[in-house]
Amino acid sequence: MLTQAVAAVGLDHAKLAEHIHAATFKTMVGDIKFGADGEWAHERMLQSQFQGVSGNAVQQFMDPAREVVLSPAEYKTGALVTPFGAA
Protein backbone atom coordinates (compact mmCIF):
# COMPACT_ATOMS: atom_id res chain seq x y z
CA MET A 1 0.00 0.00 0.00
CA LEU A 2 2.81 2.37 0.84
CA THR A 3 4.42 1.74 -2.54
CA GLN A 4 1.15 2.59 -4.28
CA ALA A 5 0.73 5.74 -2.17
CA VAL A 6 4.29 6.95 -2.81
CA ALA A 7 3.87 6.30 -6.54
CA ALA A 8 0.67 8.38 -6.50
CA VAL A 9 1.78 11.41 -4.46
CA GLY A 10 5.51 11.21 -3.75
CA LEU A 11 7.27 11.36 -0.39
CA ASP A 12 5.54 14.36 1.17
CA HIS A 13 4.23 13.02 4.51
CA ALA A 14 1.11 15.19 4.60
CA LYS A 15 0.14 14.22 1.06
CA LEU A 16 0.85 10.55 1.83
CA ALA A 17 -1.40 10.63 4.90
CA GLU A 18 -4.19 12.33 2.96
CA HIS A 19 -3.90 9.87 0.08
CA ILE A 20 -3.81 6.79 2.33
CA HIS A 21 -6.98 7.95 4.09
CA ALA A 22 -8.79 8.56 0.79
CA ALA A 23 -7.58 5.85 -1.61
CA THR A 24 -8.53 2.23 -2.12
CA PHE A 25 -5.48 -0.02 -2.46
CA LYS A 26 -5.24 -3.19 -4.54
CA THR A 27 -3.51 -5.88 -2.44
CA MET A 28 -3.03 -9.63 -2.49
CA VAL A 29 -5.85 -9.96 0.07
CA GLY A 30 -8.24 -7.79 -1.92
CA ASP A 31 -9.08 -4.11 -2.00
CA ILE A 32 -8.31 -2.21 1.21
CA LYS A 33 -9.66 1.20 2.14
CA PHE A 34 -9.30 2.93 5.48
CA GLY A 35 -12.16 4.55 7.37
CA ALA A 36 -12.18 7.85 9.26
CA ASP A 37 -10.91 6.14 12.43
CA GLY A 38 -7.89 4.62 10.64
CA GLU A 39 -9.26 1.07 10.71
CA TRP A 40 -10.22 -0.83 7.58
CA ALA A 41 -13.45 0.56 6.12
CA HIS A 42 -14.65 -3.00 5.47
CA GLU A 43 -13.86 -5.52 8.19
CA ARG A 44 -12.33 -8.82 7.11
CA MET A 45 -12.83 -11.09 10.10
CA LEU A 46 -13.24 -14.60 8.70
CA GLN A 47 -14.91 -17.56 10.35
CA SER A 48 -13.55 -20.85 9.13
CA GLN A 49 -13.63 -24.54 9.96
CA PHE A 50 -11.04 -27.19 9.25
CA GLN A 51 -12.77 -30.14 7.58
CA GLY A 52 -11.55 -33.62 6.71
CA VAL A 53 -8.92 -33.62 9.48
CA SER A 54 -7.82 -37.00 10.79
CA GLY A 55 -4.98 -38.11 13.00
CA ASN A 56 -2.31 -35.83 14.44
CA ALA A 57 -0.36 -34.77 11.33
CA VAL A 58 0.27 -31.02 11.42
CA GLN A 59 0.77 -30.89 7.63
CA GLN A 60 -2.95 -31.32 7.01
CA PHE A 61 -3.58 -27.91 8.56
CA MET A 62 -1.33 -26.36 5.91
CA ASP A 63 -3.63 -27.64 3.14
CA PRO A 64 -5.91 -24.74 2.17
CA ALA A 65 -8.49 -27.22 0.85
CA ARG A 66 -9.14 -28.32 4.45
CA GLU A 67 -9.90 -24.82 5.76
CA VAL A 68 -13.39 -23.82 4.69
CA VAL A 69 -14.40 -20.16 5.01
CA LEU A 70 -17.90 -19.91 6.49
CA SER A 71 -18.36 -16.15 6.60
CA PRO A 72 -18.56 -13.41 5.47
CA ALA A 73 -20.70 -14.52 2.55
CA GLU A 74 -18.53 -12.82 -0.08
CA TYR A 75 -15.58 -15.11 0.83
CA LYS A 76 -17.57 -18.25 1.70
CA THR A 77 -16.08 -21.46 0.30
CA GLY A 78 -18.29 -24.06 2.00
CA ALA A 79 -20.85 -24.88 4.66
CA LEU A 80 -20.51 -25.52 8.39
CA VAL A 81 -20.29 -29.22 9.19
CA THR A 82 -22.05 -30.27 12.41
CA PRO A 83 -21.69 -32.15 14.62
CA PHE A 84 -18.04 -31.12 14.75
CA GLY A 85 -16.89 -34.73 14.90
CA ALA A 86 -18.01 -35.11 11.28
CA ALA A 87 -15.78 -32.22 10.22
Image (tube, grey):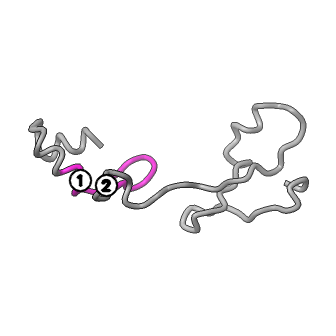
User: What amino acid is at disc 1?
Assistant: His
Looking at the image, residue 44 sits to the left or right of residue 24; the answer is: right
Identify the residue at image location x=90%, y=36%.
55
User: What amino acid is at disc 2?
Assistant: Asp
63 or 84, nearer to the observer: 84
Q: Do the residues under discs 1 and 2 have CB atoms within 8 angstroms?
A: no
How many discs appear?
2
Looking at the image, residue 6 sits to the left or right of residue 66; the answer is: left
Q: Which mark is residue 21?
A: 1
Magenta region, residue range: 19-34
Image vertical order of residue 69 relative to residue 1, above or below: below
Tag 1, which secondary structure?
A: helix
Residue 28 is inside the magenta segment: yes
Q: Quadrant of residue 72?
A: bottom right
Could you classify mark 1 by the number of other residues whose Cα lies within 10 Å: few (under 14), some (14-19), or many (20 or more)?
some
Q: Quadrant of residue 57?
A: top right
Percent position (x, y) of residue 25? 31, 52
Percent position (x, y) of residue 48? 67, 54
Q: Which mark is residue 70?
A: none
Percent position (x, y) of residue 60? 77, 37
Could you classify mark 2 by the number of other residues whose Cα lies within 10 Å: few (under 14), some (14-19), or many (20 or more)?
few
Dividing the image into 4 quarters, which one contains the C terminus? bottom right
| Distance in Å between CA atoms under marks 1 and 2 | 9 Å
